[in-house]
């Protein structure tokens, strides 16, 4: 393993993040606060409790997931798309690094940024609602796993994208609906039966359910199923990336 | 001199079937400066990109210092530095950061003293904290060179390093190349400026339509392919060449003051002695005599035209 190269990629990407740290933090904090005001206060005054948890607290895991998933995807996709776009990718291709090292560098940095945002949102949430975390370690583990798996997905999108529109399109068209329909703001059990069944094909349901379990100790789907689902998803992304580098798809002629 | 880069039967077809390299064989010697000349689209960049790992060959092999570029990519790529033809740089990065990144990416531990030396050598040290977008085009090109040198490569590829660079900077660049050669770095550069190859290369390769037409020692090439011309200036202009002197090799300048005689340096008899005697016999008085050798440019143009025919 060329750890020096991995560290170089990682720290170069992180430097970009810290250069624009203010705007990196302000926007997720602001939007989360708005969610609390709109959903927590407006809807929360009508829905008192979901599964024995106050509505304000109930949406915290979903809100964190929403931001973390969006951030992981956009950071990772931009991180690898940008060198492709401006042509600096030639350096990566001519460097003595293998695909795993490139992925660890870029995906690691994107996941770290997303994790950072997730933690900041959690801290913000403490200002609005009372929350206690039932399984803190599981919570952190879920958070990290989510950051990594969606950063992997973002990496694939970044390599696939041929222009900036496509780079925005996938998150907008696929990921946002999946996350919103994934039970961020409600329990799946609140849906009509047919929609409950459809929801089980949405991978994000398992994530948010598992994450919520870590907070409140109760979940829509069994925790092991959640773990299995996210494990499968991560494995799938890794396989696609491995194939991309083996064939040089969209990067090496 | 030992071979450092050994290219055997290298072929490259791009998606869509276009064959950009048609079986290139080339041995690059350690420590030399090799200039690759060729018209646009000849395959120079494709050749370099393949050696560096940016494109994959369709068939054939390349070894660098005995390591195959596919199976031994870590060894070969660690030894190679590449300055690409296009200026590809992150506009918002600082010079020093992007150069440091390059060194790390190639697996070398951080060494700010080494980077300082490189940046000073390229007259970039006082720009080290500038954003790249704030640099001039020539400076950007030097940043690319600094990035390529950041990991102390043994082999340096310069893909048209002096394209769009003013005369002053071009001379600087040649000095940098000479310094690197003195440090034992093998340098392969592509160029459209033939005077550049003439000025700095040890050997010259000519490539056209994906084929390497020749690789030869520059001096030998110029001696072998070079035609010489003898110019005889007369004290008084003449209207036509006297009958006794007329031959295919002799022409008269428009103003009638100069006779130009072309001859081949390889020929056993150049015919100069006879010409001068005949000139005297014809009653012409010489004002001056000089010889001119054809440049690499003439040789190059001849070669590429021959290939096209
Ligand atoms: N990615 C690509 N896909 C298809 N064809 C390509 C690609 N890159 C280069 N070519 C073709 O391969 C041939 C050689 O291109 P190359 O860039 O190697 O030429 P070059 O000798 O470097 O030319 P120049 O002096 O203009 O830089 C050209 O005909 C070019 O159109
Ligand atoms: Mg080129």
Image: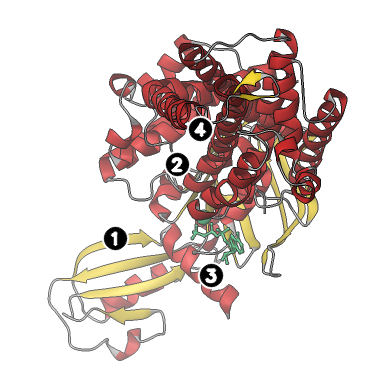
Which chain does the residue under circle 4 lie in?
Answer: A
Q: Secondary structure at mark 3?
A: helix
Q: Is residue A42 left or right of residue B278?
A: right
Q: Tag 2's secondary structure?
A: helix
- Label 3 is found on which chain of the structure? B
Closer-to-camera residue (B60/A216): A216
Helix, strand or loop status at disc 4: helix
Q: Residues within 10 Å of mark 2 (few under 14, many from 20)?
A: some
Circle 1 is placed at which residue position?
B290
Could you tell me how far apart the alpha carbons at marks 4 and 3 are, in whole angstroms? Answer: 78 Å
Label 2 sits on residue: B200
Residue in the picture at 68% in, 63% down:
B14
Pointers 3 and 2 within a single chain? yes
Circle 3 crowding by C-alpha within 10 Å: few under 14, some 14–19, many from 20: some
Name the subunit of mark 2: B
Q: Nearer the viewer, mark 4 or mark 2?
A: 4
Point out residue A214 in the picture as x, y percentages from the top left corner: 73, 16
What is the C-alpha distance between the residues marked 3 and 1?
29 Å
- State the residue position of label 3: B304
Give a yes or no on whether discs 4 and 3 share a subunit. no
> What is the number of callouts on the image?
4
Q: How far apart in space, not on screen, are marks 4 and 2 (Cα)?
A: 77 Å
Q: Residues within 10 Å of mark 4 (few under 14, many from 20)?
A: some
């Amino acid at each position: 393993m060329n750890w020096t190269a991995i560290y170089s990629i990682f720290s170069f990407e992180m430097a970009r993040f810290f250069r624009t740290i203010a705007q990196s933090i302000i926007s997720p904090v602001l939007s989360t606060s708005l969610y609390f005001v709109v959903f927590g206060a407006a809807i929360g005054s009508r829905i008192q409790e979901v599964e024995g948890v106050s509505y304000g607290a109930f949406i915290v895991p979903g809100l964190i997931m929403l931001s973390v998933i969006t951030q992981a995807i956009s950071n990772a996709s931009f991180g690898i798309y940008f060198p492709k776009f401006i042509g600096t990718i030639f350096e990566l291709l001519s460097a003595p690094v293998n695909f795993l090292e490139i992925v660890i560098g870029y995906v690691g940095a994107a996941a770290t940024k997303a994790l950072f945002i997730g933690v900041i949102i959690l801290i913000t949430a403490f200002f609005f609602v009372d929350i206690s975390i039932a399984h803190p370690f599981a919570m952190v583990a879920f958070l990290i796993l989510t950051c990594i798996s969606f950063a992997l997905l973002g990496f694939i999108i970044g390599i696939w994208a041929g222009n900036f529109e496509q780079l925005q399109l996938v998150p907008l068209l696929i990921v946002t609906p999946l996350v919103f329909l994934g039970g961020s703001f409600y329990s799946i059990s609140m849906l009509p039966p047919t929609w409950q069944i459809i929801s089980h094909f949405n991978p994000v349901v398992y994530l948010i359910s598992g994450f919520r379990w870590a907070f409140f100790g109760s979940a829509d789907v069994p925790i092991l199923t959640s773990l299995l689902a996210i494990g499968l998803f991560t494995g799938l992304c890794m396989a696609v990336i491995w194939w991309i580098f083996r064939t040089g798809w969209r990067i090496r002629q | 001199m030992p071979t450092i880069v050994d290219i055997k039967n290298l072929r490259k077809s791009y998606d869509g079937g276009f064959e950009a390299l048609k079986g290139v064989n080339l041995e690059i010697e350690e420590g030399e400066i090799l200039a690759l000349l060729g018209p646009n689209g000849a395959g120079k960049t494709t050749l370099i990109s393949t050696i560096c790992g940016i494109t994959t060959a369709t068939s054939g092999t390349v070894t660098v210092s005995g390591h195959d570029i596919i199976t031994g990519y870590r060894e070969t790529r660690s030894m190679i530095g590449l300055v690409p033809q296009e200026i590809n740089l992150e506009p918002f990065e600082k010079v020093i950061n992007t150069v440091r990144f390059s060194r790390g990416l190639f697996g070398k531990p951080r060494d700010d003293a080494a980077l300082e030396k490189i940046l000073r050598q390229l007259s970039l040290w006082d720009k080290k904290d500038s954003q790249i977008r704030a640099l001039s085009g020539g400076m950007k090109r030097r940043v690319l060179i600094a990035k390529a040198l950041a990991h102390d490569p043994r082999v340096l590829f310069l893909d048209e390093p002096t394209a769009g660079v003013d005369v002053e900077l071009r001379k600087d660049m040649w000095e940098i190349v000479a310094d690197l050669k003195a440090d034992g770095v093998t340098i392969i550069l592509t160029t459209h400026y033939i005077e550049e190859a003439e000025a700095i290369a040890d050997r010259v390769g000519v490539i056209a339509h994906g084929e390497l037409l020749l690789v030869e020692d520059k001096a030998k090439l110029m001696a072998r392919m070079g035609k010489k011309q003898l110019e005889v200036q007369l004290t008084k202009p003449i209207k036509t060449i006297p009958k006794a002197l007329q031959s295919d090799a002799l022409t008269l300048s428009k103003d009638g003051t100069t006779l130009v005689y072309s001859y081949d340096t390889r020929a056993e008899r150049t015919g100069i002695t006879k010409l001068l005697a005949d000139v005297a016999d014809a009653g012409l008085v010489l004002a001056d005599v000089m010889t001119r050798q054809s440049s690499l440019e003439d040789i190059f143009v001849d070669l590429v035209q021959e290939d096209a025919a």
